[in-house]
């Protein structure tokens, strides 16, 4: 039964699905934001002592089942991203009554064409389609809101995802040794599918998500600070909508997130402001009206 989830290939290295809107993705391609690492492992209440490193170094112990509950990571077999995209496009075109222009907010043919492009990421619609294609319930935990969304009904099995705002990670169970705080076995031995009547795995994942939320392990697409990576373009903007508007206006889709420790400077004539991170940049823009900022390279 585990085969179905592994064949999903939902992994940051191959196919990241990021919703531009919860239910109605816009017609224009979404701007690209660099995804997080492929297998962060998350602290939860079962950890016996506070972690001394980042979230990638800790996990949740599950002693009752003699294992560890990390999430993320590479799957032994992955369906290539172009194939997954084509599966979505074909399914949309084969079900015009379900995936109408009213649902997609764009003609189905245009949506099917756009989702196959490398500069377009999907979200709720694509997860619903994967649930149908692989006959598995997909449970997605949103870290910021600590909420659970389910895709697919009346299924026998489910897989679990954790959504950070820009990236999905799978949840897996790995057999391990006491005290069950670390998974050392290869991902081939991970369990990624559970019966839909197994409530315990949802409870464990909810604990994991609560700890992620406390660590602020999420990004709000509406607030994320972006910069354009196209050579010669020093655009900086706040929020996914601003990124999309920049992409529509200029054709530039290579955008990346500005990290909180990035050093910024104001390019407005006569302003010598320097600051670091999103909060500082927003305050400067709010105080002065200066919106022309640039990242100072590390080198």
Image (cartoon, rainbow, N blue to C red):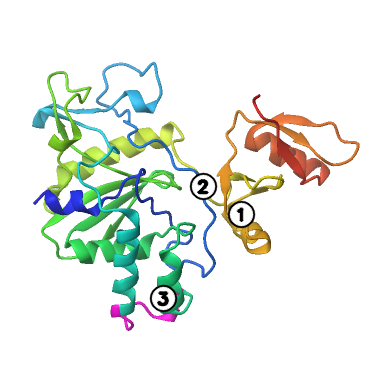
Q: Mark 1 near mark 2, Cβ–Cβ under 8 Å?
A: yes
Question: Does 68 appear above or below 196?
Answer: above
Q: Classify mark 1: residues with Cα within 10 Å, few (<14), some (14-19) or many (20+).
A: many
Q: Is residue 42 above or below residue 249?
A: above
Secondary structure beneath label 3: helix
Q: Is residue 152 visible?
A: no
**Sequence-earlier tag: 3 or 1:** 3
The residue wearing badge 1 is 243
Q: Residue at x 72, y 30 (%)?
A: 275
Residue 103 numbered tag: 3
Distance from the alpha carbon under mark 3 to that under mark 1: 23 Å
Task: Name the N-terminal-most of marks 1 and 2.
Answer: 2
The x and y percentages for residue 13 are 36, 43
Confirm whether residue 210 shows in the render.
yes
Is residue 273 rendered magenta in the image?
Answer: no
**Mark 2, residue position:** 33
Q: Earlier in the sequence, mark 3 or mark 2?
A: 2
Disc 3/disc 2 C-alpha distance (Å): 25 Å
Q: Secondary structure at mark 2?
A: loop
Magenta residues, start to end: 94-104
Residue 194's spot in the image, x, y percent?
Answer: 13, 48
Q: Residues within 10 Å of mark 3 (few under 14, many from 20)?
A: some
Above or below, 150 against 273 in this view is below
Q: What residue sits 81% from the left and 47% below the top? A: 289
- Mark 1–mark 2 Cα distance, whole angstroms, equals 10 Å
Q: Nearer the viewer, mark 3 or mark 2?
A: 2
Figure quadrant of residue 218: top left
Give the answer, above or below, for where 161 lies relative to 186.
Answer: below
Q: Residues within 10 Å of mark 2 (few under 14, many from 20)?
A: many
User: Where is residue 213 drawn, in percent x and y?
Assistant: 41, 37
Quarter occupied by the C terminus: top right
Q: Quadrant of residue 293?
A: top right
């Amino acid at each position: 039964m585990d085969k179905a989830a592994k064949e999903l290939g939902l992994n940051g290295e191959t196919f990241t699905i990021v919703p531009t809107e919860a239910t109605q993705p816009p017609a224009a391609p979404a701007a690209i934001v660099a995804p997080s690492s492929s297998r962060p492992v998350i602290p939860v209440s079962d950890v016996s002592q506070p972690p001394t490193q980042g979230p990638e170094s800790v996990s949740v112990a599950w002693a009752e089942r003699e294992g560890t509950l990390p999430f993320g990571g590479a799957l032994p077999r992955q369906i290539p991203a172009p194939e997954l995209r084509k599966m979505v496009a074909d399914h949309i075109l084969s079900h015009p009554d379900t995936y109408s222009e009213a649902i997609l907010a764009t003609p189905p043919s245009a949506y099917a064409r756009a989702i196959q492009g490398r500069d377009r990421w999907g979200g709720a619609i694509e997860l619903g389609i994967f649930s149908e294609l692989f006959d598995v319930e997909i449970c997605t935990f949103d870290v910021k809101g600590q909420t659970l969304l389910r895709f697919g009904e009346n299924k026998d099995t489910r897989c679990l995802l954790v959504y950070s705002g820009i990236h999905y990670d799978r949840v897996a169970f790995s057999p391990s040794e006491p005290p069950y705080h670390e998974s050392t076995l290869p991902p081939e031995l991970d369990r990624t599918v559970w019966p839909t009547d197994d409530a315990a795995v949802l409870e464990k994942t909810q604990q994991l998500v609560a700890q992620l939320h406390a660590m602020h392990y999420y990004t709000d697409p509406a607030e994320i600070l972006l910069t354009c990576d196209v050579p010669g373009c020093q655009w900086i903007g706040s929020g996914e909508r601003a990124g999309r508007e920049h992409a529509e206006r200029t054709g530039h889709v290579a955008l990346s997130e500005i990290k909180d420790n990035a050093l910024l400077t104001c390019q407005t004539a006569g302003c010598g402001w320097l600051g670091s991170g999103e909060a500082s940049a927003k305050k400067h823009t709010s105080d002065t009206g200066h919106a022309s900022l640039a990242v100072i390279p590390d080198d």
